[in-house]
Each structure stands twice: as structure tokens, then as C-alpha cells.
Amino acid sequence: MTVRTLLLGALALLALPLPAHAWDRGQVTTFARLPSPTRNPEGIALDKAGNVYVADFDFRGTSSGVGQIVVFDSAGAFQRVVDVANSSPALLGLDFHPQTHELLVIDFGGHKVLRVNARNGKSSLFTTIPKVSADPKAPDPGPNALTFDAAGNVYISDSFQGIVWRTGRDGGTAEQFASDPLLTTSGVPPFGANGMAFNRAGTALFVANTGNDTVVRIPVDAAGRAGAAEVFVNSINGADGLAIDGSDNVWVVANQADEIVVVDPSGKGIAKLGDFNGIGADGAPVGFLFPASLVLRGKFVYVTNLSLDLRLFNPAFNAVDSQYAAQVTVHTVARIVNPLAPSP
């Protein structure tokens, strides 16, 4: 094959039409502003009425001394701040159980998952995430995100120990569903297993690995057992929150690239959405800034702007957006139109 033939072939591939939405990043808008002094929104969930619940990852300490959830209505109007009883200030993932309808909230600082009354913040223990090694130098638990299978079992990612834990629908003792070096990291930020979701058939669990910039695929057999983990896709810069749509496309927020990356079931990139456009005069990020979690609902995608300055954990963790995150005084939830949403 000649060089001319190769070049013609490459040009022909470049000429293939792409979907109109493919690399149109869309317009990120501010859906809601968190009331001061709440800050660093991380997990996000919507109830059936479209109200939006945002977990406050305020590891420096909240005004109430416990974790807080900020609630907005479907139009983005502030409703209330819920103080979560018996929690640390550092909350991460949260979601409503699809069968029991309980609000489950990950208390990262307390190494546990709580059932929380979404109105008054009363809580009870759903499960505790244990440390698996007796070695004091071994990583502590790092519960981060949660998801559910069709039977209602609950899965919790452990970013530091590289484990996906599982409980029954009513909680109790957590068992190891999957543990693999692909779920750990030595990268920056130092979070391994993070956002998770099952494909539509329930035959695979997809797990974002933030520090490795990967999405890991864990096959699941008919008995609900995990198979050998494998890297599904690479090069998503700071792969954090993850969701799967009705066509089995995998949506991942890239917290270090300030964007959403969408890949099809083969792992091919089919869209990149959003970007960072600076800090507004009001002290709020314009666009995405260290986006952490996302939820798909109808024609929109809702995204928390964690706006996290990683240097607060370690000066060596300086990221391209760290200095901008340090300037944020108003924390936000962003929204963008879903270009892949089916027509009504």
C-alpha cells in the first residue's frame, strides 16, 4: 500500500459525516445558586416531582457542624437546607432508592451510608463501610457514589480501598462485590472508584476511576456475581460522576477538564459538552468548574459544580483550574440541554 493510498483513506474517514450535535458543546447555564455559607456541592439527585437535592461536601466544616443537603424546586428556586443528623460535614453521593424511595446519603467523613428524612434531616444507619486491612498504613474507607441494580441491591464505590461494596435493599452489612487494582489509583486527585451505573441489561457495572482517567467495566453474570474488571475507556480527565442513558451511552463528568464526555457502548466518544468560561462578577463559575456529579432528566442534564481547589488537600495537587476554584464565592448547580435526548 502506498503512502498516497493511506493518505486518501485517512481523508475519506475525515469526510464521514458526524451527528450534528457531536462536537457542539452546548450552552451551560446556572440552574441554581447555593445559599451562603453552603459550598462545594457534590452529589445530586432528583425526586419524582423534579426537585433537586444537592449534597454539600464541606470538609472544612459547615455552619451547623453536620452534613447539609440543599434542596431546590424544578425551576431552580431555593427551598431549604437540610441538616443531616449524625453525619460528618463531608457528604458525597446521594440518591432515592428506586423501590423503597428512601433518600440514601453517603457520609464520606463517617465512612457510612445514611437513610435521611428529606424534610427534617433525621437519619438512621443504612450501612457502614469497613476498613479491610488491619495495617494502620493501609487506606481508610472512602465511600463515594452509589447505584442500584434491578433487584434493589445497593452498590457503593470505595475510592480509597478500590472496592465496590453491596448491600441488600434495606442495608445492613456491606459485602465486597468487586475489588481490583483497576479501581485504585496513585494519580491526582487520589480518588479511584467513583461514579457508577449499570447498563440497561444489568450485565455490566461501569465505574469511573478519577485518578486514572478511566472508566472500568465489571461484567455481571445471571447470578449477580462480578467478573474480571477491565478498562472500558481511557483519557477522561478526572472521570467523576457517571450515568448511563436509555441507549447505553455512558456519560462521565471530567472534573479536571471541566466538561462532560459521552461515549457509546463501544467506548467511542460521541459528544463533549460544556466548558469553563471564567468566574463571573458575582463570584460564581461560568459554565462548568470541577464538575462532580450529573443526573439526566428529560431534555436536561443537571451537574454540580464542586469548584474544588485540590491544593487544600496537598499543595502538589495544583490543577489547571485550582486557582479559579479558589476564587469562587458563590457555588452553583449547572444545567445543559441533552443533545441525545429522544424527541418527545
Image (cartoon, grey):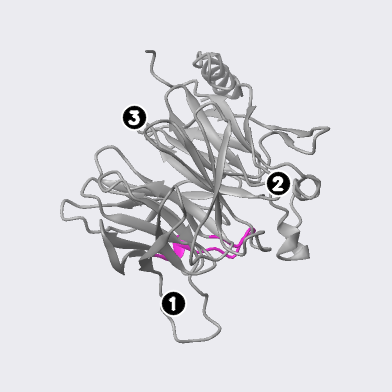
Q: Amino acid at mark 3?
A: Gly
Residue at mark 1: 131
State the residue at coordinates (78%, 34%). Answer: 278
Q: Amino acid at mark 2?
A: Ser
| Outermost bottom residue | 135
Tell me where residue 137 sits by quadrant. bottom right
Residue 246, which numbered label? 3
Q: Amino acid at mark 1?
A: Lys
In which quadrant will I find the C terminus? top left
Query: Reading the chain from its start, which is encountered first: label 2 or label 3?
Result: 2
Query: Reading the chain from its start, which is encountered first: label 3 or label 1?
Result: 1
Q: Residues within 10 Å of mark 1 (few under 14, many from 20)?
A: some
Question: SS class of the residue under badge 2?
Answer: loop
Question: In this picture, is 228 found above or below 240?
Answer: below
Q: Is residue 196 visible?
A: no
Asked if disc 1 and disc 2 are in contact, CB closer than 8 Å, the reply is: no
Residue 36, which numbered label? 2
**Which residue is nearer to you in this view: 35 or 278?**
35
Q: Rounded to the nearest whole Å, what is the CA distance between mark 1 and mark 2?
A: 35 Å
